Amino acid sequence: MTASHSDSLVVLFGATAGASGAKLGADERELILLVWQVVDLHSKQAGILHKALVKADNLELTEQCREETGLTPEGLSNAEPLDRVLQQFHQLVLNDLEALGGSSFTLCTDGQLLIRQVFHPEASKKNVQLPECFYSFFDLRKEFEECCQTTTAVKDQTIKSMADFLEISNDDTDNDFGVWEVTTMVNTVLALISWPYDHEFVCPETVKYKYETGPCSKSEVVDGETVIRARGLPWQSSDQDIARFFKGLNIAKGGVALCLNAQGRRNGEALVRFVNAEQRNLALERNKHHMGSRYIEVYKATGEEFLKIAGGTSNEVAQFLSKENQVIIRMRGLPFTATPEDVLGFLGTECPVTGGKEGLLFVKYPDGRPTGDAFVLFSCEEYAQQALKKHKEILGKRYIELFRSTAAEVQQVLNRYLSTPLIPTLPAPLIPMIPQHYPIASGTVRDCVRLRGLPYTAAIDDILEFMGDSTVDIKPHGVHMVLNQQGRPSGDAFIQMKSAERAFIVAQKCHKKMMKDRYVEVFQCSGEEMNFVLMGGTLNRSGLSPPPCKLPCLSPPGYAAFQAATAVIPADAAAALYQTPALFAAARSAYAQVAAPQAVAYYPAQATQLYMNYTAYYPSPPVSPTTMGYIAAPTASLAAAASASHTPMLPQPGALVRMQGLPYNTGMKEILSFFQGYQYAPDDYNGLIQMNDQARSVLQAPKEWVCL
């Protein structure tokens, strides 16, 4: 008989300082015991049985371990460490193999846990090089199931149950722990290779030597039973670090996808795809195992989630990632004028890029503008480490950030930027879009109420039903749903009542009343307090609290729309200017109902949705410049609407720009100095953009061209 070109098996059994059986290795406890015996498959003879103790770094044993093994910390203190035991193991196996006349061998274990969940993770953490024989082994349970079709699932088989089925004597009263297990496994092997089974050990389990990188297409079919989500990763973790955490388990090619947050930075999560469901189930057993000093949470995920993060459709990206087994480095903060020659010169000759210019991928917006990001391929880890030493060195006038990256991150970044709209829909635009007849409340009169803790599925009809008879006291277009920065319900709403007395009655009547399965808090407030809350303050029974700090708002200040507008773009003109279905899909239909006397509209058009400024007071670390929105040329319908309403409009294509990333202390003079050499037309915007008297006096200075 042959065993995958091997003529012998080494039946191996081990124990850790913690759990055993189905939970072996799940508690990260170290290996403390090894027992093995060589079986020659040709002569059907067994060699000498060996037993070795392993000295663990932590000699503390669980109560279960003490009872089962009979070992004590004192008895283990004189044992050899893992690396020395492995050397002795390999040498003794070769000696027994020579005595039996064999030339090659393959390991055979009871299940997969000892190899995959104990040896490989522990050796990886201790930087111990495992012998090659630990990358290929036979699972005795699977070999038994192949010969003996039983009703018991493979994972539920035990050494005793297999021995009972084969009618092998299993008296363990006189043997030490581990000796009976190996002896019984050897007898099981001998029974399987004999008549009537005549089984051949030919298809061993394999453990991948290293993680293979590669691209993933959105059209690829991903089995949902093979994907997990790892959470709590150190932000600097790479795909190789994650593969090392799951050492011993076979990750699919290109199966590590690091997740990014809204700012394009890693959020400490990753989706990992394994080769089959069995490997995924073993990965779930590593929940709360440690990566350095951090424990990692491991959950089930779906194939759709993996494709959303790692899948790509760009041919350029697919071609870039087609060079397999390359180390990917991400460069962030590049000057917008940087060329491939500039990047290659920055990296230098000590870390050559694979393929020269072909090893560079610049990230761009859909209109071709550079984002300041690029990905670089290196042929080996040594070159990549040399490149990482240039982290925060200067190129032009900017310092460049360099990070380890992955194929999935390349796809994710490209997908994010290629889907970025030219006219951002969130937060709300600077130009007020509120109908003049129904402005958002302002002032100190407490004629509004705030609803907090709404179910996320709550709609306008649910709020009206919640308020009951009090709906008759709501001002027309007075119900305002509050969305977060991602455009999703925040659980808040503000309602304008006809008077402060009516607002007080509603707050007393509806406070902590149930809506669906949640109770809702109702507070009386003024329009001024409402705007203050939307900018980060808090409102409760104790009164109004300011925002947590006074840092300026980092996101574009679209909250000017909450104030009374001096000039308003008509609804038809606004629809032509901002052709964004998410904002204007129902604007006309909802607004048109106001004209009909028999229909009462309690809520405004979608153009006046309120956006809670959740991120204004929690700035993220510096990032590359993000999209700079612009407003396209007015269309004919927009011009006609503007002419009919005598509303000042934008005079020419691309006349209005938005600046992001300004220093907090930037004033009007600094902005005008920044645009030296360009002509500005302040008189055309006085009616559109609200500004104080000082700013208006600066802009009303005589216009002139400034030559550089």
Image: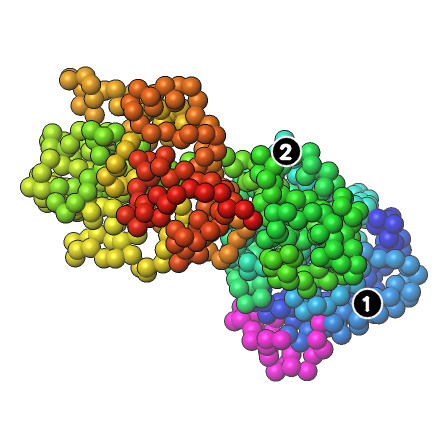
Residue 620: horizontal and vertical position, in percent?
Answer: 46, 56
Residue identifier under label 1: 90
The residue at the point 74 percent across, 53 percent down is: 344
The residue at the point 58 percent across, 45 percent down is: 371
621 displayed left or right of 553: right
Q: Which mark is residue 705?
A: none
Amino acid type assigned to the residue bearing label 2 in the image = Thr
233 displayed left or right of 450: right
- Assess whether mark 1 and mark 2 are in contact (beta carbons under 8 angstroms): no
The residue at the point 16 percent across, 41 percent down is: 448
Residue 260: horizontal and vertical position, in percent?
Answer: 53, 48
The relative height of residue 210 versus residue 604 in the rendered view (above or below) is below
Which numbered mark, 2 or 1, is in the foreground of this view?
Answer: 2
Q: CA distance from mark 2 to mark 1?
A: 49 Å
Residue identifier under label 2: 313
486 displayed left or right of 688: right
The residue at the point 63 percent across, 33 percent down is: 313
Mark 2, Cα crowd under 10 Å, few <14 / some 14-19 / many 20+, is: some
Q: Which residues are magenta?
A: 57-82
Amino acid type assigned to the residue bearing label 1 in the image = His
**Residue 182 in sight from this viewpoint:** no
Q: Quadrant of residue 431?
A: top left
Mark 1 lies on a secondary structure that is helix
540 displayed left or right of 392: left
Q: Quadrant of residue 403?
A: bottom right
